[in-house]
Amino acid sequence: MEEAAAQPGFDRFDPAFLSDPYPFYKMLYNQPPMVLELEMRTVLLARYADVVAALRDPHTFSSAPIREISQAHIFGGVPTLILSDPPVHTRLRRLVNQAFAPRRIREMEPRIRQIADQLLTRAERAGSFEAMKDLAEPLPTMVIAEVLGIPSEDYQMFKEWSDALLEVANVPPGSPPPPGFEEALEAERAYFRQRYEELRRNPGTDLMSGLIQAQENDALTFDEVAGFFNLLLLAGNETTTNLIGNGLYALMRHPEQLEALRRDPSLMPGAIEEMLRWDCPVQATGRNILHDCEFAGVRLRKDTVVVVLNGAANRDPAQFPDPDRFDIRRDPNDHVAFGEGIHFCLGAALARLEGSIAIGGALSRFPHLRLDDRREQPRYKKSFNVRGLISLPLSIG
């Protein structure tokens, strides 16, 4: 078997691709994994079977970065859940699993509903509804702030830091960090240090207090606690924000599905799964090859960068009949929006719950909800890795 030949690259910063990557993905389903010459030799995994196989094999497809990359810089080079392999990953995950256990998620439901109701009431009183700014962004940030034991009124500051830090992944290689990145990183770290000292003196029942206790018992280092804080700040709101925004937008674009969900709210769990599949909030995750191997018909060399295209896998016609059709009754729907294997998203149940409450609440509160053609059209973020809207103006009249 010959080593895969490099193919002409594609511009992952092309606005047309970022606006709608799904047409590009179609060329990847009927061939072996595509090898590209980017800043490093890179393999694209798009077919559902290939994506699942790679995500289930951490002994070949490592999550630890080969070198210092943007995400590693955000986390100060400290191993985190998303940038580590066993046994480090196993130890870190075990320490936070309890905070996201089903019982804990169920206990959070009344508070999540209360926050969503407050946000929707504010939009109703204002007489307008910009779904991203009014609901999809503040709700997950306020929820994860409370999980971390941080006053929810600080959510706007959290959201600004999160946006600035995530933007570093969207600049071309070799370019300087985006404006505001260093300032946000410094401010976020200063906030963490202050909150760390407060919770050391007066611990609560929140996740951060538990992590600090683990650090004092030598189960975690101080830097690992800081890494958890940073990771949850970023991942704890971005994926759910995109689920809510993408999901509402999908319903607005498919009025027959919207009407079906209005008539039968019991369809919401399946609708959430289809929203996750059809317009995946996390389009791509990174891996690297730990040893020379043959995979899916190509020979891969050690230290090859692998881009696992979750968004493409979720539209693979070999797995999903009529994959471009948005169908809230789709069954089965074994998408990979939350990953697969040992790195399956820790907060998946929380994201599903928040998405159901937010979208269900909006549909219930605003029975005539629709796209507002009089205002700016919905716009997507300029990101290759995550797919989400900057704006989603809706009419509530």
Image (cartoon, rainbow, N blue to C red):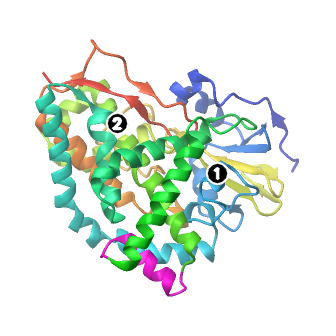
Task: Name the disc covering residue 269, or none.
Answer: none
Main SS of the magenta segment? helix
Q: Crowding at label 1, few (<14), some or many (≥20) Cα neighbours within 10 Å? A: some
Q: Is residue 25 magenta?
A: no
Under circle 1, the secondary element is: strand
Which amino acid type is shown beneath numbered disc 2?
Gly
User: Where residue 327 appears, x then y in whole percent?
Assistant: 32, 36
Residue under label 2, please give it: 245
The correct choice, above or below, for 273 with respect to 232 in the image is above
Which amino acid type is shown beneath numbered disc 1?
Gly
- Which callout, 1 or 2, points at the residue further toward the start of the chain? 2
Q: How far apart are the alpha carbons under marks 1 and 2?
A: 24 Å
Looking at the rendering, in which quadrant would you find the C terminus?
top left
* Closer to the camera in the image, 341 or 71: 71
Farthest-out residue, top = 374
The quadrant in which residue 368 appears is: top left
User: For this view, does 355 lie left or right of residue 305?
Assistant: left
Q: Is residue 249 visible?
A: yes
Q: Is residue 213 magenta?
A: yes
User: Where residue 42 appears, x then y in whole percent?
Assistant: 75, 44
* Closer to the camera in the image, 373 or 195: 195
Residue under label 1, please give it: 286
The correct choice, above or below, for 26 with respect to 319 in the image is above
Please give the range of residues in magenta.
Answer: 204-219
Q: Residue at x 83, y 60 (%)?
A: 292
* Closer to the camera in the image, 134 or 323: 134
